[in-house]
Image (cartoon, rainbow, N blue to C red):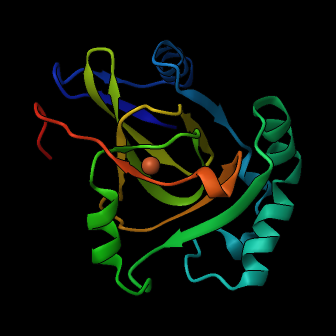
Amino acid sequence: MAVIKIRNTNEVIQGTEEVKAFLESQEVLYEKWDMSKLPDHLKERFDLSDEDKQEILNSFDDDIRSLGERRGYVNWDVISLSESTPNLEELLKKFENVHTHTDDEVRAITAGHGIFIVKGENGYFDIELEAGDVISVPEYTPHFFTLMDDRQVVAVRLFIDTEGWVAHPYEEKEYKL
Ligand SMILES: [Fe+2]
């Protein structure tokens, strides 16, 4: 279950309905996928072959197509980050810059954890995600992503158009990591 931490107030929001309501108020879509659909041999695995990634997509095909039809996402893939990822440190440094996109950023976590830090109407808030959590950060919303203490994640990404999904740096004067 996702947990929200509001940076200005240290407020913590937990519970599926509470998290969903808060994220809705910030225009961030939040849904849950049933992780029992994931075959056992892919649970908490991070070093994935192309066949493994395709099997993850096949396992959640109904969920992917349902979300895609509702929101206009037409492409999808699987990303895995862990200690076995070459240049993990470099990648994380890149991810930890505040930026925007011209399309939604959609992630369904299927293993491990990740945090999206998003600029809301009252400052930045953290969304801590675990397997089963699905979010869509709206276009033009400043945000960044990092890993949690386990330093590993697998996520399904959905796109309106892979060409349009580019990070644009966001000049943030009031905020430091
Ligand atoms: Fe992003």
Instruction: Say which residue appears at 54% left-offset and 17% top-offset.
Output: 24
Residue 116 position by quadrant: top left
Residue 13: % across, % down: 37, 22
Up/down of 91 relative to 104, above or below: below
Instruction: Say which residue appears at 76% left-offset and 43% top-offset.
Output: 73
Residue 158: % across, % down: 69, 50
The one of 67 and 138 positioned closer to us in this rendering: 138
Residue 82 position by quadrant: bottom left
Left/right placement of residue 78 relative to residue 95 reads: right
The one of 11 and 50 positioned closer to us in this rendering: 50
Up/down of 92 relative to 84, above or below: above
The one of 112 and 125 positioned closer to us in this rendering: 125
Up/down of 83 relative to 152, above or below: below
Residue 70: % across, % down: 81, 29
Up/down of 124 relative to 131, above or below: above
Instruction: Say which residue appears at 73% left-offset and 57% top-offset.
Output: 76
